[in-house]
Image: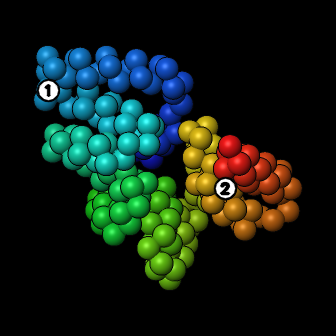
Amino acid sequence: MENDLLKTQLFAEFEVEKLKQKEEEVRMSLLINPNDFELLRELAIILYHKNDYASAIKVYKKVLEYKENKMEGYAFLGQLYYENEEYKKAIEMFEKALDINPDFAFGHFLLGNAYSRAGDIMNAITSYDFAIFLDLDIYKAHLDFAEKYEKMGAYERAIREYRLAYDIDPREKSVREKIKDLEGKIRRTDDL
């Protein structure tokens, strides 16, 4: 259940126009009730999907003060730090989440990603091993992130995730084609 809550936050889909409209609605509601932690949580998720990670972190820190499910809160805050390329803080948050629930497979995966980006490959491998031991499909998790980044227009991050999935299973030709397509989009954008 906790894993599902975090995945819902990370992989929710928003249309750009609806995202802007929803942000305006939430901010207006927060003017009336600035301490409504559900509204603050919703604003943090919206900011995350707008790639405004620094603002999402500030908002979500307030949410964490009120949040009953600290494990899910630490994990989401860890992902915000990860996206903001603050890997040491991300690792700290993921470890706090896993202290609360050591069987949180998706949390081990996220921790592995943070360790990997921080250059700590041995701890990354250990975290991925725990995730696999707890039956997380790491290949699918990388594809999920790749698709999310692609929909957000973050093509370089999408390529990175597709490459990680491809490294796990290089037999999958569609993933290799997706990498080439995105590299082409980036080149075309750079040429403009």
Q: Position of residue 178 (x, y in %)?
A: 77, 49
Of residue 3 and residue 159, the one placed in the foreground of this image is: 159
Q: Is residue 19 left or right of residue 148?
A: left
Q: Secondary structure at mark 1?
A: loop
Q: Which mark is residue 159?
A: 2
The kind of residue on which mark 2 rests is Ile
Q: Secondary structure at mark 2?
A: helix
Is any part of residue 104 visible from this angle? no
Counting labels gives 2
Residue at point 54%, 31% (across, down):
13
Q: Residues within 10 Å of mark 1 (few under 14, many from 20)?
A: few
Q: Position of residue 2 (x, y in %)?
A: 40, 44
Q: Give the number of the mark in front: 2 or 1.
A: 2
Q: Which mark is residue 34?
A: 1
Residue at point 57%, 46% (across, down):
154
Q: Position of residue 5 (x, y in %)?
A: 42, 39
Up/down of 27 relative to 87, above or below: above
Quarter of the image where the C terminus is located: top right
Quarter of the image where the N terminus is located: top left
Of residue 188 and residue 14, the one placed in the foreground of this image is: 188
Q: CA distance from mark 2 to mark 1?
A: 39 Å
Residue at point 44%, 36% (across, down):
50
Up/down of 141 relative to 59, above or below: below
Q: Residues within 10 Å of mark 2 (few under 14, many from 20)?
A: many
Of residue 51 and residue 135, the one placed in the foreground of this image is: 51
Q: Quadrant of residue 59?
A: top left
As drawn, the residue found furthest toward the bottom would be 122
Q: Position of residue 99 (x, y in %)?
A: 30, 64
The kind of residue on which mark 1 rests is Pro
Is any part of residue 153 visible from this angle? yes
Residue at point 30%, 60% (across, down):
93
